[in-house]
């Protein structure tokens, strides 16, 4: 009786596995289906590229009115409109040479900021490596730990303060770089 029940259980397990193998999809079939689905999605949808989307500078916002001038500008609405229309014309570069000059200046600023950020990152890396080497030397020399244990603590605090200052400088430099890149994007300058 035991043998018969084991036989039925093993036969059922084999049938279950065989049915799973028979109905399973091969990896090649799944790849073909995914490729076909991908082709149909791009054929029916619109793909946005840098060439198909044109970047335009954002319109200049009018400056907020001062409290003393607000009453006079409100009384003469045409004067305020004339002042607002003159401001954007002065702010936007007029010719292609001016646009190229502005683009070159932005690219130079971004390159200098990136170089400054890279230098700060290298300096932080050097500080971290020096700290690790100093710790390794301190812990490997038992006599140094016994002679002056307070000096290591002071040096450790100095290194931690220096690293925190470098990290803050890196964060500030990265924020400045992001701001410059955003300004370049708004001006329609490609800086990749």
Image (cartoon, grey):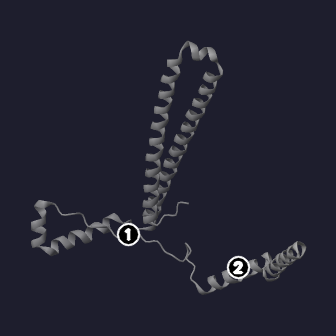
Whether residue 139 sits left or right of residue 161 in the image: it is right
Taking 164 as reference, is 84 above or below it? below
Which residue is label 1 attached to? 58
- State yes or no: discs 2 and 1 in contact (Cβ < 8 Å): no
In the image, residue 104 above or below residue 36: above
Task: From this view, report whether residue 192 is shown above or below residue 124.
Answer: below
Name the quarter where the N terminus is drawn: bottom right
Above or below, comparing residue 133 to residue 56 in the picture: above
Q: Residues within 10 Å of mark 1 (few under 14, many from 20)?
A: few
**Farthest top residue in view:** 147
The x and y percentages for residue 27 are: 78, 75
Counting from the top left corner in percent of width and height, residue 89 is at 31, 69
Q: Earlier in the sequence, mark 2 or mark 1?
A: 2
Total residue callouts: 2
Front label number (2 vs 1): 2
Say what secondary structure mark 1 lies in.
loop
Q: Residue at x 9, y 72 (%)?
A: 75
- Marks 2 and 1, how far apart in space? 41 Å
Q: Position of residue 129 (x, y in %)?
A: 60, 33
Viewer-nearest residue: 163 or 93: 163
- Which residue has dot 2 on it? 34
Mark 2: few/some/many CA within 10 Å (<14, 14-19, 20+): few
Residue under the image location 57 percent in, 35 percent down: 128
To which quarter of the image does residue 92 belong?
A: bottom left
Tell me the quarter of the image containing the C terminus.
bottom right
Q: Measuring 43% from the left and 65% from the top, which residue is drawn there?
A: 186
Measuring from the top left, give residue 3's x and y in whole percent.
90, 73
Residue at 55% from the left image edge and 37% from the top image edge: 123
Question: Between residues 113 and 149, which one lies in front from this camera angle?
Answer: 149
């Amino acid at each position: 009786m035991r043998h018969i029940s084991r036989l039925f259980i093993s036969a059922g397990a084999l049938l279950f596995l065989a049915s799973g193998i028979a109905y399973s999809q091969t990896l090649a079939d799944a790849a073909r289906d995914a490729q076909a689905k991908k082709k149909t999605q791009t054929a029916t949808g619109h793909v946005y590229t840098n060439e198909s989307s044109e970047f335009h500078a954002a319109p200049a916002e009018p400056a907020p009115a001062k409290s003393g001038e607000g009453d006079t500008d409100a009384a003469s609405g045409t004067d305020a409109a004339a002042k607002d229309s003159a401001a954007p014309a002065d702010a936007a570069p007029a010719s292609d040479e001016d646009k190229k000059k502005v683009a070159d200046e932005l690219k130079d600023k971004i390159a200098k900021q990136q170089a400054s950020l890279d230098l700060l990152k290298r300096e932080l890396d050097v500080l971290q490596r020096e700290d690790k080497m100093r710790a390794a030397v301190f812990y490997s020399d038992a006599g140094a730990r016994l002679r002056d244990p307070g000096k290591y603590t002071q040096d450790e605090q100095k290194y931690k303060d220096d690293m925190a200052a470098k990290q803050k400088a890196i964060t500030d430099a990265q924020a400045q770089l992001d701001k410059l890149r955003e300004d370049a994007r708004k001006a329609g300058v490609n800086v990749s």
